Image (tube, rainbow, N blue to C red):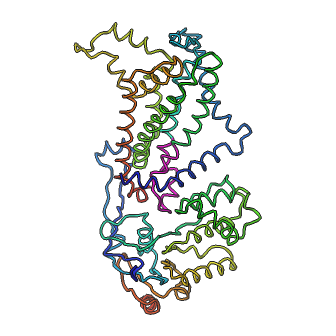
Amino acid sequence: MQYFKELASARELLANLTLRDIRGQYKRTVLGRVWSLASPLSAMLVYTFVFSFIFNIKPAAGDPSGVNVFAIWLLCGLLPWTFFSAAISAGMGSLVGNSGLITKVYFPRVVLPISSVLTVGYNWLFEMAVLTIALLIVGAFVLPWLPLVVLMMLILVVFATGVGLALSVANVYFRDTQYLLSIVLQIWMYLTPIVYPESLVRDQSDKVGGLFGTNIEVMDIYSLNPMLHFVHVFRNIMYDNRWPDSADVWACVAWAVAAIAVGLFVFARKEKRLAEIL
Amino acid sequence: MSDIAVSVESISKKFRLYHERNQSIKSAIMRRRVSVHEDFWALNDISFEVPRGSTFGLIGSNGSGKSTLLKCLAKILYPEHGTITANGKVAALLEVGSGFHPELSGRENIYLNGSILGMSRKEIDSKFDAIVEFSGVEQFIDQPVKNYSSGMYVRLGFSVAINVNPDILVVDEVLAVGDAEFQAKCFQKFQDFKAAGKTVILVSHSMATVKSMCDHAAWINKGNLQAVGPAASTIAAYESSYPS
């Protein structure tokens, strides 16, 4: 609770640090902010070519929206994922990257990882706006769902912040964290139904049945992934234009609350020693 | 309000001297420990009080623990034992221009740096002109700070910090920056501070600076407090300890 108070008093600092990163990010580039769209677009082209054209993966058409465009279906899951992955990477590096500041000035350190996540979140907002326009062009009636989209984005930001806080401290103690994380993120992405529909996993899981004589199926383990629920919800709202499964929404909320609680707890315990360890 | 600006009560600060430090998970697991270290007490049971409105000097040889103490006062390091109680807003000047972003303009950096030092946007707005004037970089305020000369950079950083307007200012030898004219300006600013009844705590190697500016001083040697009291007698004790 005392943490939130401190954070509330540091919100101007948080805003300024975030603005510093946002303004500094694309300085001296010709294309500027367009670059933040370049990476998801190139990923979209590659995945669409490989998974739709070569592997011929056909996700179900949006129900009830009727949209049936692989690239758009992909982006509805890919954009939340790329945000999450970039945000926790940025959050993780925020303390080590700002060690000069931490060892010289006192301020609530918690603003550093949070501002990193928010900077990535700002770019994500642009990407989602472009996706919304694309959805409108292909005929999805997404406008009434936008408040829900924004709400879910906030929940994902909270989740990413929690993970980022814990990782930022871990990275101060063990610099391996950054290398480990890039591998984990790569595996994690393919364990989340982003480039393929979840139904394919379900089919295989049903074929295999219970693992090692138990009634635990592949699908049960597969569903432990928090990002799976976020991808479900974003696809439901944006691509299908229908209410998401409330179990998925509650899973997202629960993961976000758990992550932020653990993240803040770890951070509060280690915060005072940061200047010494760095 | 009491007459004591800062009260330091028997603080001790321990550092670990690492003989082996495993900053990777592999080595931590292989060696079954994160580190091999011995404790080093950089500060040992130090107590003193800084009177309100005084200019307080911390003196001692290199490695005596002055900077560690200063960092404890600035809340950057936390002592293992003891407490530091400050009556009023503390601002620390351990490095000037902390958090400047090289690609941003001087103007943007003033706002950024000011908020890092704990000023609100309104406060910075009201002091903006004073900051710019004091720094003497008016002409270049909308240029990215990476194009500043090192002197201009430091002057801008110092101007922001000095305008935080704290009750207690903690300074680490940053007076040795800028040209003679700027140093004179800084000196004047400290005098104004004092006149306004504010407290300055200062670490310096220059006895001339301490003599001319401080009225109280503490001498620290190898983490132990040797003497504390009026500046003249403390400095005399320190100087008489020089091997001749």
Classify residue A40 by image quadrant. top right
Q: Is residue A239 left or right of residue A218?
A: right
Q: Tell me the quadrant of the picture where the N terminus of chain B can be found.
A: bottom left
| Residue B233 percent location from the top left of the image | 43, 92
Query: Which segment did they paint magenta?
Result: A90-116
Q: Is residue A212 left or right of residue A100?
A: left
| Rendered position, B156 above or below A95 | below
Magenta: main secondary structure equals helix
User: Can you name the residue that lies furthest to the front here?
Assistant: A144
Q: How many marks?
A: 0
Query: Outermost residue, left direction?
Result: A213
Identify the residue at image location x=53%, y=9%: A58
Relative to B135, residue A269 above or below: above
Counting from the top left corner in percent of width and height, residue A127 is at 60, 31
- Residue closest to the eye, A203 or B112: B112
> Is residue A87 shown in magenta?
no
Front residue (pair B21, A157): A157
Residue B220 appears in the figure: no
